[in-house]
Amino acid sequence: MQVSANAAARSYGAARPLTSPDPEAEGGPASTAGRLAESFTQVLQNAETTAQQTMTGNADPHALVSALSEAQMAVETAVAVRDKVVEAYLEILRMPV
């Protein structure tokens, strides 16, 4: 079976979009990071809103404690993820070329 260079190039060109990741695809890394950032922001805004409502007497102090502990857990998780990313980056920099 003889395969010409042109036929191979066309086949590769046709198959290439199937193997390339689409950054805008549902479930891709970009959309996942976006959803995580939105969730993080929402948790912090909820804690801030609850704190303001508690100071004005419109919210239960127990709700404030719950919202602040949720915000603390979100910040600690974000810091842990950031530390892992920096650690991985530094490990890549130490790899011999």
Image (spheres, rainbow, N blue to C red):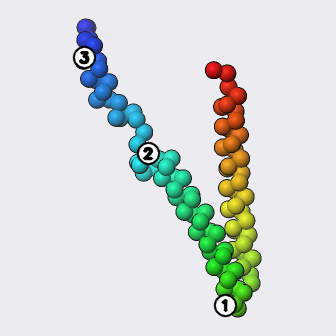
Upstream in sequence: badge 1 or badge 2: 2
Residue wearing tag 3: 6
- Mark 3 is surrounded, within 10 Å at the Cα level, by few (under 14), some (14 to 19) or many (20 or more) other residues, namely few
**Left or right: 81 with respect to 19?**
right
**Label 1 vs label 3: CA separation?**
73 Å
The numbered mark at residue 58 is: 1
Of all residues, the one furthest to the top in this rendering is 2
* Quadrant of the rendering where the N terminus is positioned: top left
Image height of 6 relative to 59, above or below? above
The numbered mark at residue 87 is: none
The kind of residue on which mark 3 rests is Asn
Q: Which SS class for mark 3?
A: helix
Image height of 43 relative to 82, above or below? below
The kind of residue on which mark 2 rests is Pro
| Residue 26 placement (x, y as % from top left) | 42, 51
Find out whether the residues at labels 1 and 3 contact each other: C-beta distance under 8 Å: no
| Residue 64 placement (x, y as % from top left) | 72, 79
